[in-house]
């Protein structure tokens, strides 16, 4: 009887391990199966489940790493592949391990390490030394080393969630007054002819009263070609004509009687039995440059030019021999000065399609050697569909860190903006006489001297942060934080007035003081308060509160951006930010309320993005997740529940599974940042706990799709 009891106890102890191992093996097999079918998002669903059970599993790390690289999430790709780098003997059983590790380094801009691993791949796989793709990749890495060492100084910005989404957005075109943008989106309408692709549709957005984009679908244009792909190419002819891509050919639609007419094929010798992907017609409509593979027996895309004849038809196309390579050339754009921009996988591309420009020399009748637009416009991913208006470029990229597979970006192709403003007395609103304004940044000091009306104009390097000192005569009267920001109206001119109090005398340094209270009972707290310089990230000074919760510190600076960080036992740490320029009479007063770590109210974690209908975290989420990890490190005794929530659209059982997988993905990320797994519990609730009604998208369902962090306990009650 004793033996039976021992066996029963042993079975009970081992059964969960058997079950977990079996479940992990099943998830791993499913993940690898989807990987082999090139369904990488589905593969990651099951590979993540396997990794949740065993984070050190070699196969799961290997295939998950490759999936992340192929899905343009290279940071996670490198992390997973690096996890198994120490298992060299086992890793060599994966013949392409060093290739993918090299690609992970390459996509993360670690070019030296990329070359090392790709050469190592060659050394253990002698038969791949002549591999064309590998040769091209190594060439791109050499190009990237040079390009990244000599950045152009431009500023590149994602157009944001108003335009970009989970779906691919690309091929943006602007109206002549730059107040309307049109672009292509693939994803919302299924293509019945393909199980893997959705239909392309055209969208537009107008600048609103705040100079921001507002999305509105062009239903009329989509309706007239129902069931077909349709994509934006170019707006021309005073915005009354549009080149459109449809069914591998180029078409023109004209705007008439308040609507776009059904597209008609571009006439002449342009369309072939092959594939015409893109075109641009010059401003005077006499010249067209287009990309096609219809004239090339090898099947790669080349650029062609044709001129309009006297009868209004296009003449015979000629290849642009100086610009075409053995690789693809696509997406031509002629600016108002006749400069040709295009994308190419050849020349000195640093990876995939890069954007180039070339100028036609009329006398010699040749095009100049293509110039790579450089970093940060070009990346190690595909950069294409470039257009430029008033020194602001628009292009499409599938670089990491975007909202979807492809996003639309803008590039500010200048280094300075023009600041126009006035220095005014805050009380009388009259111009300040004998004033001067000094703009200080990390890289420069720029002075402006207003005239007798208070007006000044100055050129400032774009996107730098300035501490602005304003003098009346020799007396310093004000310090203010200033950063030039452009709105979507694309003007390089910024208007900004500075108001000062002529009766105020600015002393050296400021006093920073306040109180720390507990949220629950409003009692004063014993807390450590640190003063941090946000520009350097370094601690300036610190203090401990008195028995009444008060604190006081002296900051010997008259400028800058700072934070106060308060930490107290059994409470959550908190930071508050302030600018020295906001000091009143030389004093910053802060009352900081700390929340008890025993509070069970869940916290919504903002800016967590997943791929559409998936538990794959976007790199856009890493900043918020890193903050969550830091919060847990700052409060090491907390135990938390990470919960996933959905809206009520779709099957409830599927929503429940998706919400739990998303919660697990967050826990998995936090584990990779050093947070112990026993402190976290992942749980999915599906649509069972909505915060608001699901009747509306923007103010309802969008809010209900969320990740929450809930404190469930203290390991040691923070010493209390």
Image (cartoon, helix red, strand yellow):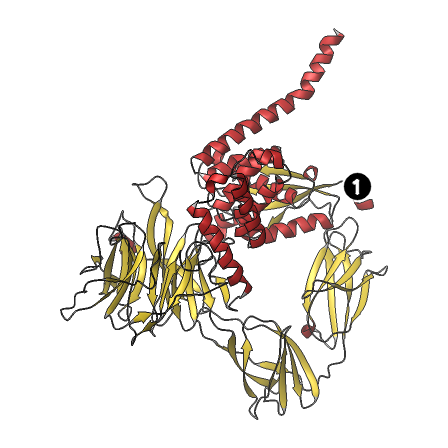
Height in image: 475 above or below 707? below
Residue 578 in percent (x, y) is at: 68, 67
| Corner quadrant of residue 709 | top right
Give the total of numbered labels.
1
Q: Nearer the viewer, residue 424 or 508?
A: 508
Location of residue 351 with respect to 181 vertically, above or below: above
Pick the quarter of the image with the C terminus. Answer: top right
- In the drawing, does residue 410 fall left or right of residue 328? right
Q: Furthest residue to the right?
A: 547
Residue at horizontal 50 percent and vertical 33 percent from the top: 31
Assign a secondary structure to mark 1: loop
**Callout 1: few (<14), some (14-19), or many (20+) C-alpha neighbours within 10 Å?**
few
Q: Write down the residue under mark 1.
A: 716
Q: Is residue 708 above or below residue 143?
A: above
Q: Which residue is situated farthest in the top direction here?
A: 1
Q: Quadrant of the N terminus?
A: top right
Instruction: Report the side of 608 relative to 305 (left or right).
Output: right
Residue at image x 70%, y 89%? 474
Residue 637 image offset from top left, x and y in percent? 75, 44
Q: Tell me, yes or no, if residue 666 can be seen here.
A: no
Q: Position of residue 238 (x, y in %)?
A: 28, 71
Q: Quadrant of residue 211?
A: bottom left
Q: Is residue 390 left or right of residue 545?
A: left
Please give left or right for residue 610 compared with residue 202 in the image: right
**Could you say where residue 390 lies in the image, as x and y percent from the top left?**
41, 73
- The answer to whether one can see residue 101 in this image is yes
Of all residues shown, which one is farthest toward the bottom?
452
The picture quadrant where one finds residue 387 is: bottom left
Rendered view: 557 above or below 160: below
């Amino acid at each position: 009887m004793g033996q039976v009891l021992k066996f029963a106890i042993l079975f009970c102890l081992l059964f969960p391990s058997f079950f977990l191992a079996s479940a992990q093996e099943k998830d791993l097999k499913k993940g690898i199966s989807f990987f082999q079918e090139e369904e990488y998002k589905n593969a990651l669903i099951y590979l993540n489940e396997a990794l949740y059970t065993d984070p050190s599993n070699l196969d799961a790390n290997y295939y998950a790493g490759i999936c992340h690289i192929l899905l343009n999430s290279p940071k996670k790709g490198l992390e997973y592949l690096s996890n198994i780098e120490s298992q060299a003997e086992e890793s060599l059983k994966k013949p392409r391990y060093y290739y993918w590790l090299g690609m992970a380094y390459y996509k993360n801009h670690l070019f030296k390490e990329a070359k090392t691993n790709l050469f190592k791949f060659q050394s253990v796989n002698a038969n791949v030394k002549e591999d064309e793709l590998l040769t091209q990749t190594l060439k791109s890495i050499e190009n990237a080393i040079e390009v990244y060492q000599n950045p152009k100084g431009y500023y590149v910005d994602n157009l944001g969630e108003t335009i970009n989404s989970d779906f691919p957005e690309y091929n943006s075109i602007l109206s002549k007054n730059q107040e309307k943008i049109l672009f292509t989106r693939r994803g919302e309408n299924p293509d019945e002819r393909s199980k893997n692709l959705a239909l392309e549709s055209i969208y537009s957005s107008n600048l609103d009263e705040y100079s921001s984009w507002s999305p509105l679908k062009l239903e009329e244009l989509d309706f007239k070609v129902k069931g077909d792909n349709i994509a934006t190419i170019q707006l021309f002819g005073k915005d009354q004509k549009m080149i459109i891509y449809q069914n591998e050919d180029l078409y023109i639609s004209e705007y008439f009687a308040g609507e776009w007419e059904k597209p008609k094929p571009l006439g002449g010798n342009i369309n072939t039995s092959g594939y015409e992907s893109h075109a641009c017609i010059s401003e005077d409509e006499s010249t067209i440059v287009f990309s096609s593979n219809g004239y090339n027996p090898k099947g790669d895309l080349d650029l062609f030019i044709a001129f309009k004849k006297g009868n209004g038809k296009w003449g015979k196309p000629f290849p642009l021999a100086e610009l075409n390579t053995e690789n693809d050339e696509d997406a031509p754009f002629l600016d108002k000065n006749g400069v040709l921009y295009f994308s190419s996988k050849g020349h000195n591309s640093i990876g995939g399609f890069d954007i180039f420009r070339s100028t036609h020399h009329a006398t010699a009748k040749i095009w100049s050697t293509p110039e790579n637009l450089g970093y940060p416009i070009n990346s190690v991913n595909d950069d294409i569909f470039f257009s430029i208006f008033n020194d602001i470029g628009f292009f499409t990229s599938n670089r990491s860190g975007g909202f979807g597979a492809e996003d639309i970006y803008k590039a500010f192709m200048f280094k300075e903006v023009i600041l126009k403003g006035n220095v005014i007395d805050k009380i009388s609103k009259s111009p300040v006489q004998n004033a001067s304004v000094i703009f200080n940044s990390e890289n420069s000091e720029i002075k402006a001297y207003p005239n007798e009306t208070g007006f000044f104009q100055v050129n400032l390097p774009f996107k730098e942060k300035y501490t602005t000192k304003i003098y009346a005569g020799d007396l310093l009267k004000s310090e203010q934080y200033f950063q030039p920001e452009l709105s979507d109206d694309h003007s390089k001119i910024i208007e900004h007035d500075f108001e000062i109090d002529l009766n105020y005398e600015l002393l050296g340094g400021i006093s920073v003081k306040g109180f720390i209270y507990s949220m629950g009972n409003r009692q004063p707290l014993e807390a450590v308060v640190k003063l941090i310089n946000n520009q350097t990230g370094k601690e300036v000074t610190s203090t401990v509160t008195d028995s009444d919760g008060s604190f006081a510190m002296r900051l010997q600076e008259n400028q800058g951006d700072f934070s106060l960080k308060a930490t107290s036992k059994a409470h959550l740490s908190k930071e508050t930010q302030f600018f020295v320029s906001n000091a009143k009479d030389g004093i910053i007063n802060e009352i900081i309320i700390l929340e008890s770590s025993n509070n069970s109210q869940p916290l919504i974690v903002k800016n967590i993005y997943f791929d559409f209908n998936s538990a794959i975290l976007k790199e856009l989420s890493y900043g918020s997740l890193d903050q969550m990890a830091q919060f847990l490190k700052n409060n090491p005794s907390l135990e938390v529940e990470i919960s996933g929530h959905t809206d009520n659209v779709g099957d409830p059982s599927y929503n429940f599974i998706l919400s739990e997988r998303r919660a697990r993905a967050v826990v998995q990320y936090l584990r990779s940042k050093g947070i112990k797994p026993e402190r976290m519990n992942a749980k999915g609730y599906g649509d069972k706990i909505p915060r608001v009604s699901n009747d509306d998208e923007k103010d309802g369902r969008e809010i209900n799709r969320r990740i929450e962090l809930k404190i469930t306990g203290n390991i040691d009650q923070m010493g209390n």
